[in-house]
Image (tube, rainbow, N blue to C red):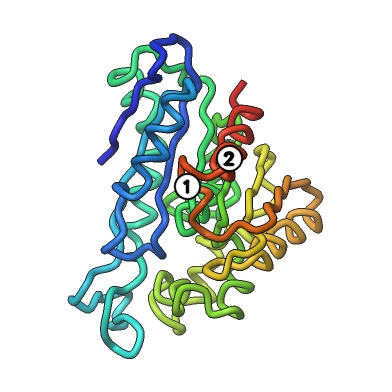
C-alpha cells in the first residue's frame, strides 16, 4: 500500500520522496504516524510516496524457519516479519517508477530520494544497498538502484550497535527471527555490513535521542568510512527521536533541507 501526495504548489517535474515509517517494525505503528511529514514535504514542493509494509503481529506467534518467535517475554508485538517486511519494501521500490508515473504525473521519477525514520531509516538504507546484498539473495539488484540519495532519520543503521544497546527492546533480534538466525540473516538485512553502496547518503540524528541513540548512527558512519565511503552525519543538539518527523519542530526543516540538497 502506498499513499501518494502531490506537490501542493502544483509544480511539475517535482522530485519524488519515498517515505518509510518507523515503529520498530511492529504492527501497532503504521504509515499514519508519518502522514504529517508526508504532507509537510508536499507543501515544500515534493511529490511523496508514503509506503506501508508488513510488520510483526500483535498476538500471533510467527513461524520463521521453524523457530517460533514472540515478543519480549513471550508477549506483545513482534518486530518485523521475515521475509515479508523485506519483500514489501523491495516490491514497492521496484514498482515505484511505474506507480508514481500513474498516480503523480507531475513527479520526476528520475529524481528519487528515499527517507525513513528509525526502523524506516534502516529500511531506507537497506533499499539503497540491495545491489551489494550477498549473491543469491532474493532482493539483490544487478546494479545500483536509480536514486539521488538516502536521508536516514535516527536510523537503526548498524545491527551490532543496536543489539548492544538494546534498542527497541530487542527489535533487531526479533526482526531476524530470533538469535538462531541472526548471523545468517543479518548479512542480508544489516546496512552496517552492506557497504559501500555508492549512493549519496546522509543521516540526521538527535543528540538527545534515547530511543535510537547517536552511537548507532556513528557506528554506521564509521563502518562506511572503513569501506571507503563518506556518509554525512548531521547532529542536532537538544533534539530527541520524534522531532525529526514533527512538522512543528525546527528539526523537521533540517530534514527537508537535507532531502532538498540531494533531490535538486
Mark seen at residue 116 = none
57 relative to 90, above or below: below
148 relative to 45, above or below: below
Q: Residue furthest bottom?
A: 73
Label 1 packing within 10 angstroms: few (<14), some (14-19), many (20+): many
Q: Residue furthest left?
A: 60
Do the residues bearing badges 2 and 1 touch, measured as CB atoms within 8 Å? yes
Residue indicated by mark 2: 255
| Direction from residue 15 to residue 206 in the image, left or right | right
Label 2 packing within 10 angstroms: few (<14), some (14-19), many (20+): many
Report the quarter where the N terminus lies: top left
Q: CA distance from mark 2 to mark 1?
A: 8 Å
Residue drawn at the location 52% of the way across and 20% of the way down: 110
27 relative to 93, above or below: below
Report the quarter where the C terminus lies: top right
Q: As rendered, which of 190 and 32 lies closer to the eye?
A: 32
Residue drawn at the location 51% of the way across and 42% of the way down: 115
Query: Secondary structure under badge 2?
Result: helix
| Direction from residue 259 to residue 181 in the image, left or right | left
Q: Earlier in the sequence, mark 2 or mark 1?
A: 1
Q: As rendered, which of 216 and 204 lies closer to the eye?
A: 204
Q: Quadrant of residue 192?
A: bottom right
| Direction from residue 220 to residue 172 in the image, left or right | left
Q: Residue 117's x, y, as percent?
A: 49, 52
Q: Residue 215's x, y, as percent?
A: 68, 68
Residue drawn at the location 66% of the way across and 64% of the way down: 214
Query: Secondary structure under badge 1?
Result: helix
Count of numbered circles in the view = 2
35 relative to 7, above or below: below
Residue indicated by mark 1: 245
Q: Residue 66's x, y, as percent?
A: 29, 80
Residue drawn at the location 18% of the way across and 76% of the way down: 60
Amino acid at each position: 500500500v502506498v499513499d501518494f501526495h502531490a506537490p501542493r504548489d502544483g509544480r511539475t517535474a517535482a522530485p519524488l520522496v519515498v517515505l518509510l515509517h518507523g515503529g520498530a517494525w511492529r504492527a501497532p505503528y503504521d504509515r499514519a504516524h508519518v502522514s504529517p511529514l508526508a504532507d509537510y514535504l508536499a507543501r515544500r514542493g515534493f511529490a511523496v510516496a508514503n509506503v506501508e509494509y508488513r510488520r510483526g503481529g500483535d498476538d500471533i506467534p510467527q513461524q520463521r524457519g521453524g523457530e517460533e518467535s514472540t515478543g519480549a517475554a513471550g508477549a506483545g508485538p513482534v518486530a518485523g516479519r521475515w521475509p515479508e517486511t523485506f519483500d514489501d519494501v523491495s516490491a514497492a521500490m521496484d514498482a515505484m517508477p511505474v506507480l508514481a508515473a500513474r498516480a503523480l504525473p507531475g513527479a520526476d521519477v528520475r529524481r528519487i530520494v528515499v527517507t525513513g525514520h528509525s526502523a524506516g531509516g534502516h529500511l531506507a538504507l537497506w533499499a539503497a544497498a540491495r545491489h551489494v546484498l550477498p549473491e543469491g539473495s532474493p532482493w539483490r539488484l544487478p546494479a545500483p538502484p536509480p536514486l539521488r540519495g538516502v536521508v536516514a532519520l535516527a536510523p537503526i543503521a548498524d545491527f551490532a550497535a543496536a543489539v548492544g544497546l538494546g534498542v527497541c527492546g530487542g527489535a533487531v533480534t526479533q526482526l531476524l527471527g530470533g538469535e538462531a538466525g541472526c548471523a545468517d540473516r543479518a548479512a542480508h538485512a544489516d546496512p552496517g555490513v552492506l557497504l559501500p553502496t555508492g549512493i549519496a547518503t546522509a543521516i540526521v540524528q538527535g543528540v538527545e535521542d534515547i530511543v535510537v541513540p547517536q552511537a548507532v548512527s556513528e557506528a554506521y558512519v564509521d563502518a562506511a568510512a572503513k569501506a571507503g565511503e563518506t556518509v554525512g552525519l548531521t547532529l542536532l543538539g537538544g533534539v530527541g527521536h520524534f522531532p525529526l518527523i514533527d512538522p512543528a519542530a525546527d528539526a523537521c526543516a533540517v530534514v527537508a533541507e537535507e532531502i532538498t540538497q540531494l533531490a535538486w
